[in-house]
Structure formats: structure tokens, C-alpha cells
């Protein structure tokens, strides 16, 4: 696990883009595992800027997203499907048929997403980390062997996400569909981005403590190629 500490969010985003660009430049039909949330927005803005200024093409790229809320329409302004189109897909030349965002609320929906990924090998998986150490929506206690599944969101996660729903926790979905930890770990390379002092405990547990289901991100210690890019605030307890 390579840990890179930089001064602020902008520097973190630029460095994350460098890691992403290397993958995309070296393999024109790369498969990207993508994440939502505030952490990767700067990365996505750099990808759009590079596409517009340098012509980097995503026409042959395939993407698979980590997760999606259960119970809200794909076109809801806070769906992750909408998030990805607003923050990345609209700004690059990726084909809509190559975009995959999980959707549904049954085991069959989960199995179908796993099956859709069977024919691909994710070249780089982007991750954020929750304040409780979750990756995707794999909350503490999730077995490392878990594949795509439906999760009940913890109160902490719902409170953290209430800011996107007019600070009204009653509007925040109670469940999500997410790639499992075993699914995430299949990726050839993992790029985790974290900023802010509220992530410091989770980052420290991920890097310094033995792999434990109580901090799902700690499983990344078992992966052969992980780059963690954090700002000074998120690295404060390393």
C-alpha cells in the first residue's frame, strides 16, 4: 500500500488524476471502477479538463460504479446514476452503453451486476472511505468474502449523507446496493482518495491496524497494488 500525503484537496485531486491518466493512456479500452461522493469530484474535474484540452478519449472505456441507493429513481437528483452523469460522463466521450451503475433491491439484481462484471477485469477501482472505514457501502462487520449485495445503511452513514438531502435524514434512503469487498478486491489496481480531518481515524485504522471487518477498508492491505492519496488533515493520525 503506497500512501501519498499532499497539502490539500486540489493537490490530492491532481495526483489522483495522474494515477488515473496513466491507466487510461496505456490501455484505450481500460475498465474503470468509479465512486461517488465528494472525494473523487476533483479527480473527475481533472479528467474532464484533460479530455477537453488534450483530447484523451474514453470512447472505448467501460465503467462500473460501486454502488447506488435503493428506492430512489435513477433520475432523482441525488441518485448516483445522476451524480456520475453530472460530474463526469457528460464531460467526456464515454458511450452510454459502456456505463454500468448498479440498480435494484433484490438478490437477483445483485447477481446480475456481478454477472455483468464477469467478462471484465477492472483495471483501476476508485474508492473513497467513510468516517467509519466503509468502502462502497460495505459497512463495518461486512465479511471480506461478500460480493454485490443489498445493505442497510447505518445511522452514521445516513447522517453523513443527509447534507445531500436538504439536511433531512428522513429523505435519505435506508438501503443501498453495493459491490462487495470481494468484488472490489478483484480490481488490478485500487486508488483511494480521502480528505478532511473527519477521515483521519478511518485512514489511520486502514493503514496501521491489522485487517479487520470492523474497518472494511483495512482489507486493502491484502491487495497487491493500492495507492492511497490523502491530504494533511486526513493523514493527521498516521
Image: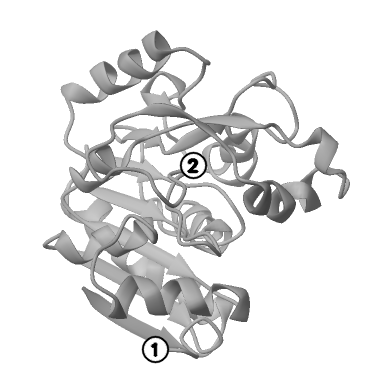
User: Residue 41 or 136: which is nearer the viewer?
Assistant: 136
Q: How many marks on residues?
A: 2
Label 2: which secondary element? loop
The quadrant the C terminus occupies is: bottom left
Mark 1, Cα crowd under 10 Å, few <14 / some 14-19 / many 20+, is some
The quadrant the N terminus occupies is: bottom left
Which mark is drawn over residue 49? none
Residue at position x 75%, y 32% in the image:
77
Residue marked by disc 1: 238
Residue at position x 48%, y 43% in the image:
137
Q: Nearer the viewer, mark 1 or mark 2?
A: 1
User: Residue 47 or 176: which is nearer the viewer?
Assistant: 176
Label 1: which secondary element? loop
User: Residue 183 or 60: which is nearer the viewer?
Assistant: 183
Using the rendered view, name the quadrant where residue 32 is placed. top left
Residue 219: x %, y % from top left: 25, 58
Which mark is drawn over residue 92? 2
Amino acid at each position: 500500500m503506497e500512501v501519498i500525503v499532499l497539502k490539500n484537496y486540489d493537490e490530492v485531486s491532481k495526483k489522483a488524476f495522474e494515477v488515473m491518466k496513466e491507466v487510461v493512456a496505456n490501455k484505450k479500452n481500460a475498465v474503470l471502477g468509479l465512486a461517488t461522493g465528494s472525494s473523487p469530484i476533483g479527480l473527475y474535474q481533472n479528467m474532464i479538463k484533460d479530455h477537453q484540452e488534450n483530447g484523451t478519449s474514453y470512447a472505448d472505456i467501460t465503467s462500473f460504479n460501486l454502488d447506488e441507493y435503493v428506492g430512489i429513481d435513477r433520475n432523482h437528483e441525488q441518485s448516483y446514476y445522476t451524480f456520475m452523469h453530472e460530474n463526469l460522463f457528460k464531460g467526456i466521450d464515454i458511450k452510454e452503453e459502456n456505463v454500468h451503475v448498479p440498480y435494484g433491491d433484490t438478490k437477483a439484481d445483485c447477481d446480475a451486476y456481478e454477472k455483468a462484471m464477469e467478462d471484465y477485469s477492472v483495471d483501476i477501482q476508485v474508492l473513497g472511505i467513510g468516517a467509519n472505514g466503509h468502502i462502497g457501502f460495505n459497512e463495518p462487520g461486512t465479511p471480506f468474502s461478500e460480493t454485490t449485495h443489498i445493505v442497510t445503511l447505518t445511522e452514521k452513514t445516513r447522517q453523513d449523507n443527509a447534507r445531500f438531502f436538504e439536511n433531512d435524514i428522513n429523505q435519505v434512503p435506508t438501503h443501498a446496493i453495493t459491490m462487495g469487498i470481494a468484488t472490489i478486491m478483484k480490481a488490478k489496481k485500487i486508488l483511494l482518495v480521502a480528505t478532511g480531518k473527519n477521515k483521519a481515524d478511518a485512514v489511520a485504522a486502514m493503514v496501521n491496524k491489522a485487517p479487520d471487518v470492523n474497518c472494511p477498508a483495512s482489507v486493502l492491505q491484502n491487495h497487491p497494488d493500492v495507492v492511497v492519496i490523502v491530504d494533511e488533515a486526513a493523514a493527521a493520525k498516521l
